[in-house]
């Protein structure tokens, strides 16, 4: 099945304890697309400026991502984000954000994108997310990410948007903020009550948890000695997750076994993403490496029942 | 195999968003003993004051914990701790600590305790821990817990004590503080370099991780809608963990399968412990409930390999 993602396409400047980059390809839709491309056909939708060129397209085309719905705004500049991570790498300090062409973005989806069976609404203003969802009448499985900014400034719109999706991806703090519940299990149940069938709580260095009507599932993050740049980890997670789901055909979003494997593929892609800056690691990642780490996740979480006496 | 624990025996006053208790049985050695008692014979070593009476002994004897090495200091008062938890329940605010008989505690172990095959040095001053370890010549498997206070004020002694144990139980922040490594995997490896064969990182609401020469294993915490009182969760974890190991005979501390099951039993006991105040829940816990939740842990972490094409 084909997968469509709407979100930011950006240039990022990042400084972490392990180095810095002044200008590299980034954005939620980019990280998502590259991760999902290991499993299914991906179409990316979003605006760029005239500064977005061959090198950037080459990264996306290198992973066979369809860029027909990337719209170049003449005279515009691509969305820019500058961030800095401190020693613990858990918190990004935003030092600069220039919306550029994102300032008055109105998504126009091609027929092909509108008929994608799976849709991911990456973190953008919730009104925009909802209008995209309304255009995508063919979508049978819709995932959504958001952030504290929209919970703060556009809560009603966000809640309305969440009502129309199947899978909600948020970090712990955002789920608590959205629902006003400090207990994560209660927060997840409250969020499921807003519409989605399942909630995925992203927990950074602690991994991720999946809440479904069937119950609870959780995976640790892959243990890494060095994390160079956490930017895009959550979108890579969602890309691996939804890419795998999209590859499993109809009903995958309600199949507990498939959802759990999607958690492992999401965790796998997120772990590779953070090993180097920006898209550097995922650009040269192979499917063999992906499957190898998927197996590592099985090995590092499995334990046997108590042998019978 | 028999298991001996040295640590605090206390009265606790606790306030959490779900209620409060003015005076209840607590202390690291108590929480540990009760948890471990589901798996093996346990002997508890520590001092109490004259205010420690029949009701308190009854709780320990109710779980068949051997209290012969609890020493009553005449004219003394039992260790007292008062703490308060805020909404998120992750951080305990200490409001009062009265060392009482713990002020000049010098452990005197009976022959039976000295010959226990498994020993747990609960969180007390590291010189004391080391002297106990030296007395226990029969111990083939020794676990140790500590805290930020001793890392701060008695680091050299703590490092020397850690060198003599097999299993180190600490929370994430303590492991980072002990080693000066912000990355948890590096911190755990550094800690293993100090002597212990394995390191167990306690992660509160995120569960726990096990680092051994064989690799990495992690389990989420059991999802609970309501946590009444997190006091003693870490000691209940260690009790379930070491109690199960002790029940598995010689070599259990180097058997990866057994260690992973110990992680699940530890997580199980910790999860029951926090469901109610103090020892209330564990006092009436049954082995059947323990094994049921152990199976829940398997169910909520298992996922299947990708079916072959």
Image (tube, coloured by chain):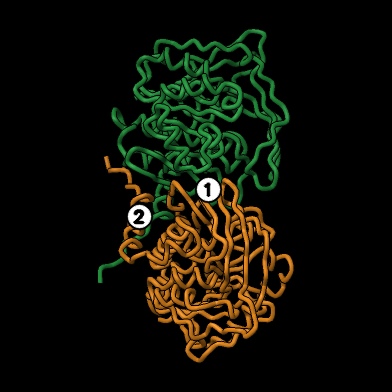
Chain colours: A green, B orange
Q: Nearer the viewer, residue B231 or A169?
A: B231
Tell me, for residue B298, which label it has, or none: 2
Q: Is residue A106 above or below residue B100?
A: above
> In which quadrant will I find the C terminus of chain A?
bottom left
Residue beneath the point at 47% across and 27% down: A144
Q: Is residue B76 above or below residue A26?
A: below
Residue B254 shows in the view: no
Q: Residues within 10 Å of mark 2 (few under 14, many from 20)?
A: some
Q: Nearer the viewer, residue A47 or B155?
A: B155
Whether pointer 1 and pointer 2 mark residues with C-beta atoms closer than 8 Å, the reply is no
Residue B19 in the image, given as x and y percentages of width and height: 53, 52
The answer for how far apart the CA atoms under marks 1 and 2 are is: 18 Å
Tell me, for residue A206, which label it has, or none: 1
Residue B140 placement, left or right of B191: left
Helix, strand or loop at disc 2?
helix
Chain holding disc 1: A
């Amino acid at each position: 099945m084909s997968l469509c993602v709407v979100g930011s396409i950006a240039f990022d400047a990042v400084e972490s304890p392990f180095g810095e980059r002044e200008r590299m390809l980034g954005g939620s839709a980019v990280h998502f697309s590259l991760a999902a491309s290991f499993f299914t056909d991906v179409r990316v939708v979003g605006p760029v400026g005239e500064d977005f060129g061959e090198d950037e397209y080459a990264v996306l085309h290198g992973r066979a991502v369809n860029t027909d719905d990337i719209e170049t705004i003449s005279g515009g500049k691509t969305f820019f984000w500058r961030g800095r991570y401190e020693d613990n790498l858990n918190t990004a300090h935003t030092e600069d954000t220039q919306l550029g062409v994102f300032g008055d973005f109105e998504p126009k989806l091609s027929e092909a994108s509108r008929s994608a069976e799976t849709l991911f609404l990456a973190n953008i203003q919730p009104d925009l997310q909802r209008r995209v969802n309304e255009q995508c009448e063919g979508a049978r499985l819709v995932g959504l990410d958001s952030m504290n900014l929209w919970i703060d400034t556009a809560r009603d719109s966000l809640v309305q948007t969440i009502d129309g999706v199947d899978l909600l991806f948020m970090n712990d703090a955002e789920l608590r903020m959205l629902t006003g519940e400090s207990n994560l299990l209660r927060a997840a149940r409250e969020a499921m009550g807003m519409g989605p069938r399942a909630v995925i709580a992203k927990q950074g260095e602690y991994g991720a948890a999946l809440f479904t009507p069937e119950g609870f599932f959780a995976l640790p993050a892959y243990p890494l000695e060095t994390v160079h740049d956490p930017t895009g980890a959550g979108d890579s997670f969602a890309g691996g997750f939804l890419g795998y789901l999209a590859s499993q055909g109809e009903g995958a979003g309600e199949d507990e076994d498939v959802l759990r494997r999607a958690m492992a593929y999401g965790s796998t892609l997120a772990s590779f993403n953070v090993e180097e800056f920006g898209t550097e690691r995922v650009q040269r990642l192979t499917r063999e490496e992906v499957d190898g780490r998927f197996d590592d996740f099985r090995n590092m979480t499995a334990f046997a029942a108590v042998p019978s006496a």
